[in-house]
Amino acid sequence: MLPTIRCYAVGVKRGWLILFFALVLASSGADPSPATPPESKVARKQAPSPSSAGYLRWDRAKRRVDADLRGWPLSKALEKIAASTGWTVLVEPGLDPQVAARFTQRPERDALAVLLADVNFALLPTPKGPSRLLVFRSNADSATLEVQPPKDTDDAKEPGVLEKELIVRLKKGSKEDIHALAKRLGARVAGSIDGLDAHRLVFDDAEAADRARTELASNENVESVESNYAIGSPTQLERANGLTPLPVSLKARPLKDGSSVIIALLDTAVSSTGVAHADFLLPGVSVAGGAAGDSGLSHGPAMFETVIQGLAISQQSDTGQPVRVLPIDVYGGRSETSSFEVAQGVVVALERGADILNLSLAGPSSSPILHDAIQQASQAGVIAFAAPGNLPTTSLNYPAAYPEVVAVTASTRGGAIAPYANRGNYVDLIAPGTSVVPYQGESYVVNGTSVATAYTAGLAAGLIADSGKSGAEIVKQLQAKIPFTPPPSP
């Protein structure tokens, strides 16, 4: 989810923003406490979320399973299993605990053991017809209630799935030519990510993509096949008068000694035209087709200026700042991007030496390829900050919900969680959700968890530049000073 952007005709007080981060800056030179990340950093992200959209991908040809069904009732999970496998599923009446399972590429039997960890089950092949899956407490004879797959197939679809697209990864050392393979399947290659050996295939219609998925499942040169997911469009700003942005007196220090701290901003295009702090911009990159251009006043420039304001809160050095922002256009002027393009942007950011990823975007479906890219970033010591979304729910949104990502939700001026902000148990930090940004001499107000994420990315970059500490150490400091505590369940 991307932020709602509203314009106001009155001034906005800025003192609350500075006060909010005062705790962080007051001890920026001291070792953070606790010495290790709070348990919530990983444990909360592994805990079930009852509103999670979730998914189940059952590769019947390779008998491999991907799943994220945390917080689902058993009854719903069994409906998914029945629909995905074609098995006859029988369950003991009244048996409906919650499922807490998240994994990728597990063998079929292992997957069932994880999915049904809190109950007993038996998978019985039959000479004719589908296998029978019995789910019960202690006696298989008690499994008498047949589970019916969802009648409405649209309800079973993953949210945001691009039905005419597939992401295909070839096995290492494979001699298969992806363009020849795509041609045989009736598709075109719309993009490739060399660092992940992944290719984006686009078909004429959803039926052709489904047929290709089945054919690819039995291709010995194919490592995996997955869906591509849409990620929503940023909102355009409108001009308003009488607003005053946070004063910024930072200078960009010439980069001659290799000591820069680079924030990769994956968003709409940002150019030096119109922004107030162009000295902090590196040349832009586009992974969404064409050269990185000027998208005008859009989400990307607003997030860039918010990053600079976060940097200004931590730094007002007279010697100048070594921090730079690398804008990576993942939208290409379109109304939406995709998980493939965001993953591509992450890989480009790593290739160009990014220290921090600012991901002020979110979608409801988990993407294996995007998660792989995020894991590569984490292994390289790169911090990823992401927005959890602008609906006041606990639903999982990605990439914020990945354990390797620092999810930042939005606060009000009083420090409470903003009424529109996601408050899932995977959220790590809370930061101000309102930014007043300049553009071509005018001022605009932006609200959302995207704003909170951009403030925090800028603040973190300034702390790294000032202290020389690693990104992991700065994350510990932030977790100690501005942690998010999920509100109690009603």
Image (cartoon, rainbow, N blue to C red):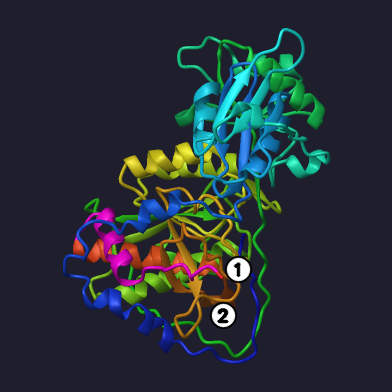
Q: Quadrant of residue 147?
A: top right
Name the residue nearer the viewer: 328 or 371.
371
Is residue 149 visible to the viewer in this orientation of the structure? yes
Tag 2 secondary structure: loop
The mark that comes first in sequence, 1 or 2, is 1
Q: In this rendering, which labeled residue sits more in front, label 1 or label 2?
A: 1
Membership of 399 in magenta stretch: no
Res. 260 image quadrant: bottom left
Q: How many marks?
A: 2
Looking at the rendered structure, the kind of residue marked 2 is Gly
x and y percent of residue 205 in the render? 81, 31
The residue type indicated by label 1 comes to Pro
Q: Residue 441, labelled with which disc?
A: 2
Residue 88 lies, with reference to residue 327, above or below; the image says above
Left or right of 410? Residue 209 is: right
Which residue carries the number 1 mark?
392
Q: Look at the image and give the residue range highlighted in magenta.
A: 468-489
